[in-house]
Amino acid sequence: MAKPIMLTAGAIPVIVALLIAVPLITKPDIPFSAANPNDTIRIEYTIHQLKKISFGVTENVKAQKTEILLIKNNGEVEYSVTKEGYPQPQIKSKLSEKQIRKLTALIKETGFIEIPSESFPIKD
């Protein structure tokens, strides 16, 4: 038979694991308390697929494909793609108020901050 001390020593890690796991399982992923009705957001996410072009001595980098996702504070979503310098038709959609609140809370909880667009000039 196992000694009671061994059973107690073996039960301690199990109890600690349960104390850690239960709150992680039962709580919602994103607390909406972080979102404030006065918050305003504007998200622009850009992906560039770049290709290096060599002209002998010099090299140039050109975007083969550019994807831009823009989410405005009122829930408007715009997705645009540019392939080989030619813009494709823009896709527009709308997010619900609940989704905007959830996104705002996620950004505030994970530490994203607003970066002024003036600080990064756009180059052609």
Image: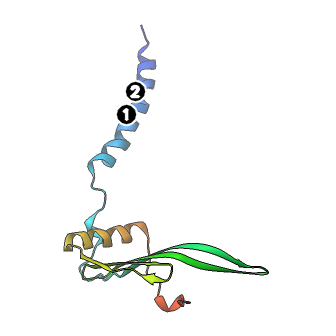
Between 97 and 53, the one lying in front of the other is 53
Residue at 20% over, 73% down:
96
Q: Quadrant of the C terminus?
A: bottom right
Q: Report the residue at 44% width, 73% height from top.
A: 112
* Amino acid bearing label 2: Ala
Tell me, yes or no, whether the two marked residues, 1 and 2, touch with CB atoms within 8 Å: yes
Instruction: Answer with left or right where residue 77 lies relative to residue 43.
Output: left
- The amino acid on which the numbered mark 1 sits, given as a three-letter code, is Ile
Residue 78 is situated, as x and y percent measured from the top left of the image, at 32, 79
| Residue 22, image quadrant | top left
**Residue positioned most to the top:** 1
User: How many numbered discs sit on the rendered protein?
Assistant: 2
- Which labelled disc corresponds to residue 11? 2
Measuring 61% from the left and 73% from the top, which residue is drawn there? 51
Farthest right residue in view: 57
Seen in the picture, residue 122 relative to 109 is either above or below; the reply is below
User: Could you classify mark 2 by the number of other residues whose Cα lies within 10 Å: few (under 14), some (14-19), or many (20 or more)?
Assistant: few
- Under circle 2, the secondary element is helix
Would you name the residue on which mark 1 appears? 15
Q: Position of residue 17 (x, y in %)?
A: 39, 37
Q: Quadrant of the N terminus?
A: top left
The 10 Å Cα crowd at callout 1, few under 14, some 14 to 19, many 20 or more, is few
Q: Residue 36: x and y, percent?
A: 26, 77
- Classify residue 38 by image quadrant: bottom left
